[in-house]
Image (cartoon, rainbow, N blue to C red):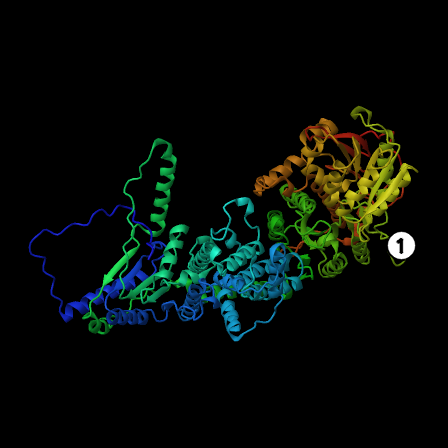
Amino acid sequence: MSSALPSATPEGPRPVPSPGRAPAEPAHTPQSRREGLQEFLRVFDRIRIRPTRRGGDIPLPILWVTGPWEATSALADAFEERCAGTPHTVVAPAQDPPDERSAPPYAALAAQLWDATRHLAEHAAPGEAHLRFPLFAQVQWLLGLHVTEEGHELRDGVRRAMNQRRRQIKTGTEQERRSFWKNVRAYAEGPLPAWAAATAILSAGWADQLTTLFGLCALLAGPVIGSLHVLLLSRTWAGRRRYMWFLRQPYLMPENRRNQPRDLTGFAVRLLSARDDAAAAEPRRSREAAQANDEIERLLVNAFLEDLRQGFERRLWKVWRRVAWARTSYPVMLVNGGDPRLVSRIEEVRGAARLADPLLVVVTGPGERPGPASRPGVLAGRPDTAEELWDRWGAELARDRALGSVRDLRIELEAEDEQAVAKANSLPVYRRPRPLLAHPLIPWIAVTALVAVSLVRVLATATATCGPGIWRTSTGECVGVSEGGFEFAPHLAPVLGLIDRQNRAILTSGHPYATVVYFGKLTTSGTSQAGAYDPLTDIHGELAGIALAQGRLIENNTDGSLLQMRVVLANAGADFRYAQDVARETVRRAEEDPTIIGVIGLGESRTHVRAAIEELGRKALPVISTTATFDDLDVRVRDGRRVPSFFPLAPPNSRLAAVAAGWARAGVPERKVRGARTAKVFIDSTSTDLIGTDLGAKFTAAFGREAEPVPYRHARDFPALVTKACGQKTQPDLMYYAGRTAQFGAFVTAIEQSQCQGLTIMANDDVTQYVNDHAPELGGNQRVRVMYVALAPPSATRDQQRVFPAKFKTDFYRRLDALTASLGMTRLPRTHLPSPEYAVQAQDAAVALMAAAQEAFAGQGVTAAPDGPPPVVDRGGVLLALENLQEIDGDSGLVKLHGAADRRHAKDRPILLVALDPDGRQVVIRQCGKLYAKQPATADCREP
C-alpha cells in the first residue's frame, strides 16, 4: 500500500537490541487488558470529539488497529457503538465486479464513497441538520450522464443534458425525494432566517418612508423569498457558486491555465472524456486508462473531503452557518478488513491538497500497515538548485502544518483482547455539549423576535394616531395641528423643542399673548418631488426665523405690556398634500381657541395650498404667506372671487418674470454676460405645482418670441431635453429654470454634460437653498454660469455690507448663527442647517402679523382682571390692522403688505439677481424693490 505523508523528520535506523537475553514481555492480566482497552477507548473519544473554536481544529491521524480478526472485529463493533448518534460509516472491503467489463475500475471506490456519504448523512444529533454532499453527488451525476455527442459536439450535448436536468421540477425516485427534503432541512437555517431578518428590518423603515401596505408586503415577502431560495438550493444541480469549486481544485485540470475550463460545463466535458478513457479496453490505451481512472478516483475523494470541510467550517464571517458550530464530534470512517485502496487515496489527496479535513479514519483488520516511506532529513543540492530546495522545504512545512508530521497511530491487539473488549466498552461515552448559542432554536427565536418587533412597528405605523389633532396618512406621515412638543421630524427636533419651551414660558408668565399658526410641510415622503430624504432646510429655516421672532418678543417684554407670540404648528405633509384637511382642522381649532389670530407659512405655490387658503378664508382667518409667488393663489376655484384675508409677502410671478426677462435681455456687462437674444425656458409641468407652469409662461411672454418653453416632469427628462436644445445649429444664449430646487442639480449636471459651452443659467427663487449648499461647485464651474433671482439678501457678511448701508445693516444672520450654535447644530452638514434666506422671510412675516396684533390689542384698551386670564386679541381687529399696516423695515427687505399696482400684493418687495464668484461667494448684481423704506427706487425695473 502506498504511504501516507512522509514524516517531517528522518526516522533513521531503528535501535538494535543488545545481545544476550531478550527483554521480558510484561504479563497481561484480564484486568490490565480491560484497563488498557478502556484507556484506548477514552483516547478514541478524545480524538473524535471536536475542540472548541478557541482550541482550534486539529489535523486528524489515521488510526490503525491490527491483530487477530476476532479482536479487531470486536473493537470495530465497540467503535461503531460509541459513535451512535453521530456521523459515522462502516466501509467494507471493495467487491470486484463479476465482469470486469461491466464497470470501470473506479466504480468500486465510488460505490464505497457513495455508501459512506449515505451513512454519514443518516446520523446527526437530535434536532440538527444532517451532513450533505453536493460536490460528491454532482461528480456522481456527471459520471452517470448519458451523452451521445462526441468531439466538438460534446460540449453542446453536455449543456443540453444539464439544462434538461435543471428543467426537471419534480424529483424522480423515492431516494431522490428523501434526499431533497433532507437538503431542505440542511439549507433552511441559512437563507430563510437571513431573508426574514433582512426584510423585517427593511419593512419597518419602508413603512415609515413609503406606505404601510408596502411595509407589510415586504415583511411577508421575506419568508416567501427565503423559502424559494431554500427550495432552489436544495436541488442537487443548483448553486453556480457552489460548483465553481471544481474549477479551483487540481484534478482533471490541464497544466496550462489558458486551457482550463471557465464554467461547470467545460469541466463536465473533461470529466466525461476521462470517464471514456478510463473505460477504454484497448491494450494500447491501458496506461491512459489507468491515469484517467486514478484522476477520477482522486476527484471523487477530493469532492468527498471538501463536502466534509464545508460542513464543518467555522468562520466568524459565516456565523449564520449555525450547524457547523453545533457539530461537536468529527465524522468517523471505520474501514474493516484493512482495505488499503480507499485509505491510500484519501491520504494521497490530503497530501496534495494540504488542507485539513474533519474525517477520522479508523482501519481495523489482521493485515499489517506498511510503515511510511522515509523522508530525507536534509535537502541537499548544488547552488543552482537552491530555489528548488527552498520551495520543497516550504511545501513540506505547509503539509506538516495542515496534516501533522506523523500521520499514523498504530494499535496492536492480541487474541486475548477479544474477551476484554466487551467489558471495556462499558466505559461511558464522552460527548462535548453543544454550545448554547449554536442551539437550533436560537436563529428562529431571534428572527421571530425581529419579525414580531417589525410587525408591531408596521402595525403601529398603520393604526396608531400620532397625537391629539394629528393623524397618520397612507404615506406614513403625521399631519395635523400640534399644540407643541410633537416631533414631526427628528432633525427638526432642536428648533421645535425651543419653540415648545418658549410657548410654555409664555403660558406660565400670565402675560397676554396671541397664538400664531405656522402652516408648513414638516415631514417627507418617498412619493414627493424632493423624496423621502429631503432635509427640509427651507422649513427648518422658517421655524428658526419664527423662533427668533418669538424669542425677541420674550426678551423685550420686561414690563409685560408687549403681546407675546405663542406658536402652534400645522403640518400639511410633503408637497402640502394634506393642506386642505389640515386647514379644516386649523379652522376648528380657531373656533375653539379665540387666541388664534392668524396663519403664517404656506410658502409654496401648489393647488393644495390654494385650497387651504380658501378653507382658511371662510372664517376670515388672516394668512401671511412667506415665499409663495403664484399670482392667483388667493382666487377661489368655485367662484373666482378672492380671499380678502390673504396677504402674500413675496412678489408675484408676473413681476418676477418681467424683472428677470428684462435682466436677461439687458445682460450683465460687468460680469461678461451679454444680453440674451434666445432662451430656452424649462418649465416644471407637475399638475399640482403652480409655480413652474405659471412662472414659465409669464417669463416666456415677457422675454418675447425668441423664448421657447421646454416642459418637463421629472429630473430624468433633463438629459434628453438639454441634449436636444444644445444640439441645434445655434445654442441658446440663456436657459431659464422655472422649477423646484430638488431637480435643479440634475438640470445643471445635464447642461455640464451637453454640447453647450459657456451657457448662462437664470433660475427662479426656489433654487436658493441649492445654491447655498453648492455655491463653491457652481461658482467654480467653467462650463455653466449660474444666476438666480432671490427674494432676500444673501446671508454672507460681505454681501450684506455691499447691499445694506451701515445704518440699515441687519443683525438677523448673526442672531441666527447664535441660535444654531446654542442648539448644537454647528456640527451638522451645511445641507442640513436652517436656510437663512427662508428664516429671515418667515421672521418678517411673524413680525408683521404680531405688529398688527399689537396694534389691534392696543386699540381694544382692555386690561386683565385680577387673578383672571389674560385678555384676548380680537381677530377682526387684527385683520383690519393688517389691511392698514404701516411699512416695516424688515430684515429681508421692505414689508408693506398693501399698495402694489394690483392692490393684492406687497409693494416694493426686493427682487435680487445673484451671481456667483469663482470662489462660491454670492454677489447681488441687480436689484428691484426696496431693502428698506428710505432706499431710492431703481429706475430700470420693468413692471409687468
* Residue receiving disc 1: 641
Residue 503 appears left or right of 784:
left
Q: Residue 283: horizontal and vertical position, in percent?
A: 47, 58
Judged from this view, the residue extending furthest toward the right is 705
Q: Is residue 101 above or below residue 650?
A: below
Q: Which kind of residue does numbered mark 1 sit on?
A: Arg
Decide which of 521, 601 is in the foreground and name it. Answer: 521
Q: For residue 938, what is the image quadrant?
A: top right
Q: Residue 704: horizontal and vertical position, in percent?
A: 92, 37
Judged from this view, the residue extending furthest toward the left is 20
Q: For residue 417, what is the image quadrant?
A: bottom left
Judged from this view, the residue extending furthest toward the top is 670
Q: Identify which residue is drawn at 66% across, 44% down.
A: 544
Q: Residues within 10 Å of mark 1 (few under 14, many from 20)?
A: few
Q: Is residue 433 above or below residue 806?
A: below
Decide which of 832, 359 is in the foreground and name it. Answer: 359
In which quadrant of the rendered image does the N terminus lie?
Answer: bottom left
Q: Identify which residue is drawn at 79% across, 32% down.
A: 759
Residue 720 appears left or right of 245:
right
Mark 1, secondary structure of its residue = loop
